[in-house]
C-alpha cells in the first residue's frame, strides 16, 4: 500500500482533531480508539476524497472500522490495488 494515503489521513487527524501521530496506525479503530463521531468520520472522508479527487462509495463507508479500511478503499478508488 502507498503510505501517502496513510500519511494524508494521519496529517488530517493530527491537525484537525489533535490526535497524536503515534496513535494513528493502520489498525487503529476509528470510533473506538480515536473516539471520532460519525460527523468527524465523514469530515475525514470528505478530506480524503477532495485530496485525491475521488468519490468513495457510500455503501462501503459503513464497513470502515479501522484506518487501514479507509486507506485501502482509497487505494482501490485510485486504481492502485
Image (spheres, helix red, strand yellow):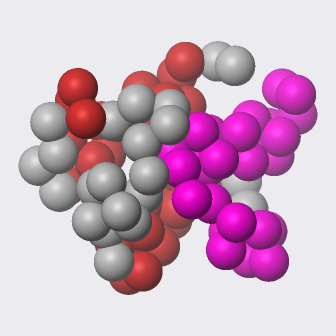
Name of the residue lying farthest toward the top: 2
Q: Main secondary structure of the magenta part?
A: helix
Query: Between residues 9 and 62, which one lies in front from this camera angle?
Result: 62
In this rendering, would 38 be left or right of 79?
left
- The percent position of residue 45, horizontal first and vertical second, equals 52, 62
- Which quadrant holds the C terminus? top right
Which residue sits at x=50%, y=37%? Answer: 27
Which residue sits at x=69%, y=19%? Answer: 1
Query: Between residues 15 and 34, which one lies in front from this camera angle?
Result: 34
Q: Is residue 25 visible?
A: yes
Residue 53 sits inside the magenta stretch: no
Which residue sits at x=47%, y=73%? Answer: 42
Name of the residue lying farthest toward the front: 32
Location of residue 62 (image quadrant): bottom right
In this rendering, would 75 be left or right of 42?
right
Q: How many numbered marks, from 0 up? A: 0
Q: Is residue 74 visible?
A: no
Q: Above or below — where is 21 with respect to 16?
A: above
Q: Above or below — where is 58 with respect to 76?
A: below
Highlighted magenta segment, given as a residue range: 57-81
In this rendering, would 52 be left or right of 26?
right
- The percent position of residue 64, horizontal first and vertical second, equals 63, 60
Q: Above or below — where is 54 with respect to 78?
A: below
Amino acid at each position: 500500500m502507498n503510505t501517502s494515503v496513510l500519511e494524508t489521513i494521519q496529517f488530517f487527524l493530527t491537525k484537525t482533531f489533535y490526535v497524536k501521530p503515534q496513535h494513528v496506525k493502520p489498525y487503529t479503530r476509528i470510533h473506538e480508539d480515536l473516539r471520532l463521531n460519525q460527523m468527524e468520520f465523514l469530515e475525514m472522508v470528505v478530506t480524503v476524497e477532495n485530496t485525491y479527487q475521488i468519490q468513495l462509495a457510500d455503501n462501503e463507508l459503513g464497513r470502515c472500522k479501522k484506518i487501514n479500511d479507509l486507506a485501502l478503499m482509497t487505494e482501490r478508488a485510485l486504481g492502485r490495488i
